[in-house]
Amino acid sequence: MKTMTATFMTFHYPERSFAYVRHVGPYMGDVKLFGKLFNQVAPWMRSKGINNPNAEAISVYHDDPKTVPIDKQRISVGFVIPKNIIGDREIAVMKIPEGKYAVGSFEIDVDEYGEAWDSLFAYIKDNKLKISSGLMYESYKNDPKTHPDHKHLVDICVAVK
């Protein structure tokens, strides 16, 4: 770890609606890909009357990169939206389930995401939590371009029981 800072906790989140686009294939470290995916969802949100520049940006990880071939790994990238909005052919909407999550809040460099995930899994193990069948996702808290050191402020959330 170079400069990563982290805090850990468990937190009960309510159910939330999430507007997203899905990507299948390589994604790790591809900042341009994530930007492209977020930029597909943002205009759709505006067309639905959602003009919230502070909407929570999330990437959901559906597959374990240690067991699923890279060309089959799925991610869903988008924003939390009001519950009354429905998806269409362009942008899908899913529920992020209510429940207990292990949360690691990190201030990291772009190349420290893997270490951040590893440290959250260590927290889960050390605290005798069990990973549930729920979601694993990253919730982004800033635009790294606006941080003086270009750090990424991110919460990594793993559903636990």
Image (spheres, rainbow, N blue to C red):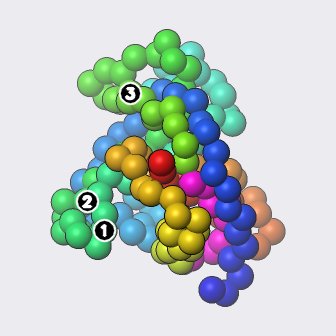
Amino acid under disc 2: Gln
Q: How far is mark 1 from mark 3, CA to CA?
A: 24 Å
Q: Which residue is mark 3?
A: 93
- Residue at the front extreme? 128
Mark sitting earlier along the chain (3/2): 2
- Residue nearer the viewer, 58 or 88: 58
Q: How far is mark 1 from mark 2, CA to CA?
A: 7 Å
Quarter location, residue 27: bottom left
Q: Secondary structure at mark 2?
A: loop
- Residue at the right extreme? 148
Residue 116 in view in this figure: no
Quarter location, residue 144: bottom right
- Residue nearer the viewer, 160 or 87: 160
The region drawn magenta spans 102-113
Q: Provide residue 70's location: percent of width, then percent of height.
A: 23, 68
Q: Are marks 1 and 2 in contact (CB under 8 Å)?
A: yes
Mark sitting earlier along the chain (1/2): 1
Query: Neighbour class for label 2 at 10 Å: few (<14), some, many (≥20)?
Result: some
- Residue nearer the viewer, 87 or 101: 101
Q: Secondary structure at mark 3?
A: strand
Q: Which residue is mark 1?
A: 65
Look at 68% across and 77% down and name the residue there.
4
Q: Secondary structure at mark 1?
A: loop
Marker disc for residue 73: 2
> With 47 as the anchor, is 141 left or right in this view?
right
Tell us which disc is closer to us: 1 or 3.
Answer: 1
* Vertical placement of residue 55 versus 83, above or below: below
Amino acid under disc 3: Val
